[in-house]
Image (spheres, rainbow, N blue to C red):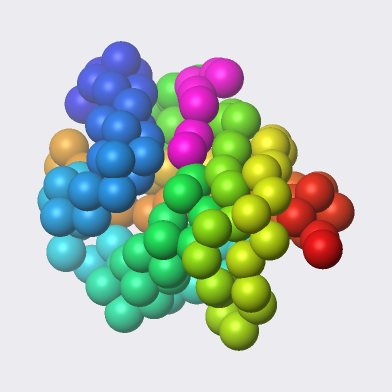
């Protein structure tokens, strides 16, 4: 795929994530996709999808793309992540407070789908902004 097509795939990923459309989101990944992030790593279906559902429900996360850089089968993304702590997450009661932070993801594509995704975010900034 071209660099622009790979960037478009990441744009579709962000749109599906922001909408909470996990069926559409899952369709963008290969069957054996691997995900690495701040809450762990593993197979998309066993590890990532349940975590993403919980995060979306608790924080209403919305990603805004600031930069996309593509080279070959890889795309790097820089986002502004925003959300509001509106439902319990892993035993922590919601505060109703909002946050904004920097997040980055690195994608590896295969056959027109996302094969691997690595994510990093400024969780310390989130904790400072959401603390009671």
Q: How many marks?
A: 0
The location of residue 106, given as percent across then percent down, is 51, 42
Magenta stretch encompasses residue 9: no
Magenta segment main secondary structure: strand
Q: Quadrant of the C terminus?
A: bottom right
- Residue at image x 30%, y 33%? 15
- Residue at image x 44%, y 23%? 70
- Residue at image x 59%, y 38%? 82
Left/right of residue 93 with respect to residue 5 in the rendered view: right
| Residue at far bottom of view | 91
* Camera-nearest residue between 23 and 47: 23
The location of residue 52, given as percent across then percent down, is 40, 62
Q: Quadrant of residue 40?
A: bottom right
| Residue at far front of view | 96
* Camera-nearest residue between 62 and 49: 62
Q: Is residue 41 visible?
A: yes
* Camera-nearest residue between 113 and 104: 104
Q: Is residue 110 visible?
A: no
Q: Is residue 54 above or below residue 127?
A: below
Specify the segment rendered in magenta.
62-68
Q: Quadrant of residue 96?
A: bottom right
Q: Quadrant of the N terminus?
A: top left
The location of residue 121, given as percent across then percent down, is 67, 49
- Residue at image x 36%, y 39%? 18
Left/right of residue 49 with respect to residue 38 in the rendered view: left
The location of residue 116, given as percent across then percent down, is 38, 54
* Camera-nearest residue between 11 and 64: 64
Left/right of residue 119 with respect to residue 101 in the rendered view: left
């Amino acid at each position: 795929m071209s660099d622009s097509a790979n960037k478009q795939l990441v744009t579709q990923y962000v749109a599906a994530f922001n909408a909470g459309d996990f069926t559409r989101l899952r369709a963008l990944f290969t069957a054996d996709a691997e995900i690495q992030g701040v809450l762990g790593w593993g197979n998309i279906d066993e590890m990532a999808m349940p975590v993403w559902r919980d995060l979306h429900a608790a924080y209403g996360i919305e990603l805004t793309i600031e930069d996309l850089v593509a080279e070959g089968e890889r795309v790097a993304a820089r986002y502004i992540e925003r959300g509001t702590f509106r439902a319990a997450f892993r035993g922590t009661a919601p505060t109703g407070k909002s946050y904004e932070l920097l997040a980055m993801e690195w994608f590896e594509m295969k056959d027109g789908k996302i094969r691997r995704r690595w994510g990093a975010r400024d969780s310390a900034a989130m904790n400072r902004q959401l603390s009671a």
